[in-house]
Image (cartoon, coloured by chain):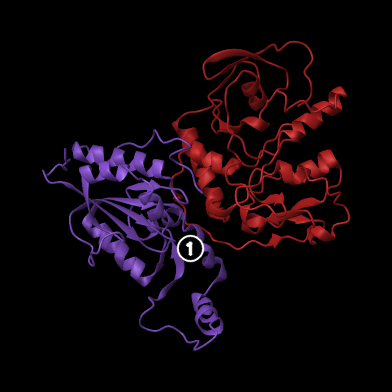
Chain colours: A purple, B red
Amino acid sequence: MSEHNGEGRRLRIATAWLGGCSGCHMSFLDLDEVLFDLAEKADLVYGPLTDVKEFPPDVDVTLVEGAVANQDNVELAKAVRANTRVVVSFGDCAVTGNVTSLRNALGDPAELVRRVYVEHPDIRGAMPTDVVPALLPYVEALHEVIPIDVYMPGCPPSADRIKATLLALLDSLAAGEGIPSLDWRGPEDLRFG
Amino acid sequence: MSPRNGRPNVPVTIDGQDVKAFEGESILELARRVGVPIPTLCHLEGLSIHGGCRLCLVDTGDHKLKPACATEVTAELDVTTTNAEIREHRRRIVELLFAEGNHICAFCVSSGSCELQDLATEHHVDHIHYELGYERHDVDASHPKYVLDRDRCVLCTRCVRVCDEVEGAHVWDVAMRGNEARIVAGMDIPWGESSACTWCGKCVVVCPTGALSFKGRATGEMRHDPELVAFLARARDEGEWIDRRAEA
């Protein structure tokens, strides 16, 4: 049986990958057979697991992995927010900056870029120009850039945690009830690290 | 906690429950004795009272909330240990601790056995409302056996107190104030150069976070043993030195 949002069409979910290691997406794939349940409830319309170039309109839920580290991350985050009913800050990098934000304590990222691209390579060291997106002066948590509806910490959030939170969310949206209370979350569902 | 003489005879109400407290007992001691949970961070049984973290704030009907660890009971006191306002204060305290340090649980030696991480879960901290500071704090890895990672320090001063009060070495102090406050060895020398340090490791086992750890532990491998101090305090009072905690 397929589930629909309040407007009578199938639920649409997406994922986005900003400044993170993709571990949260790996954990999402760890849902294993639950992915079939998910496919019954919703269509996956965008993300690293699809071959869609532009973020589509009318998305019900988007899981956003990673901190906001560069200009591309800012643009994708804003596209997600503009086209999504429920944005989930997905994993510790999105929620707190986590590992991605370690460079914040080191100050100006230009020095880091020079170390990595000019000093470190054995041959042809040069500053990147048009292909590599410009780094922001400071890495920010996702909620510092766009408003967030649901936070799912974890590095990565376990498959069980993703399942519990995401299914609660989809079931509530399908019933036309909006974002559910997540006060039931205990140590298995809510924990940094 | 010193042993109490006689019977408790001070009438106190705690969360609607009528109980009898000992003369001079703190609200926290009473609550723990009668099974009412109050969260703590800086407090540790067997050490002096610090009253710094404010997680144990309770409502006594006064115009302001009081730290349960540092407030003695009085006759007819009516204590509320938890309500919406108190929970909100506690959640904000935990968030401020996260905002002030660099508590990156994902690669912390103490992840999985960290009192700050547990408090965050317990108080439903799913993100930090405050702007994260990302202040850089120095790591001191000069000691052959132990490491001090100030990024993970919450300045609870358990290490300062246990070294002074139980080991009698007084290696640790808090230097500077406000955001600059930091734990220092001796007169701010590398820990490994401290001639006062006896290498006993008590500071390491009482640390509530990953700030103090055994050298060489990887992510999630550190296990602290803060209850050791209560055992030592009782052992000194009662002359019973066999550690039976593992059997309990």
| Residue at the spot 39% in from the left edge and 48% down from the top edge | A30
| Residue at the spot 36% in from the left edge and 80% down from the top edge | A131
Relative horizontal placement of residue A159, taking residue B181 as reference (left or right): left
- What's the residue type where badge 1 is placed? Thr
Relative horizontal placement of residue B3, taking residue A15 as reference (left or right): right
On the image, the x and y values in percent for residue B103 come to 56, 53
| Residue holding disc 1 | A100
Query: In the displayed structure, would residue B213 be above or below residue A120?
Result: above
| Residue at the spot 60% in from the left edge and 48% down from the top edge | B220
On the image, the x and y values in percent for residue B138 come to 67, 62
Relative horizontal placement of residue A100, taking residue A83 as reference (left or right): right
Picture quadrant where residue B75 is located: top right
Q: Secondary structure at mark 1?
A: helix
Q: Residue furthest front?
A: A33
Query: In the displayed structure, would residue A171 be above or below residue B199?
Result: above
**Closer to us: B111 or A30:** A30
**Closer to us: B103 or B47:** B103
- State the quadrant of the N terminus of chain B: top right
**Closer to us: B151 or B9:** B151
Q: How many marks?
A: 1
Q: Determine crowd level at label 1: few under 14, some 14-19, many 20+ residues with C-alpha closer than 10 A.
A: many
- State the quadrant of the C terminus of chain B: top right
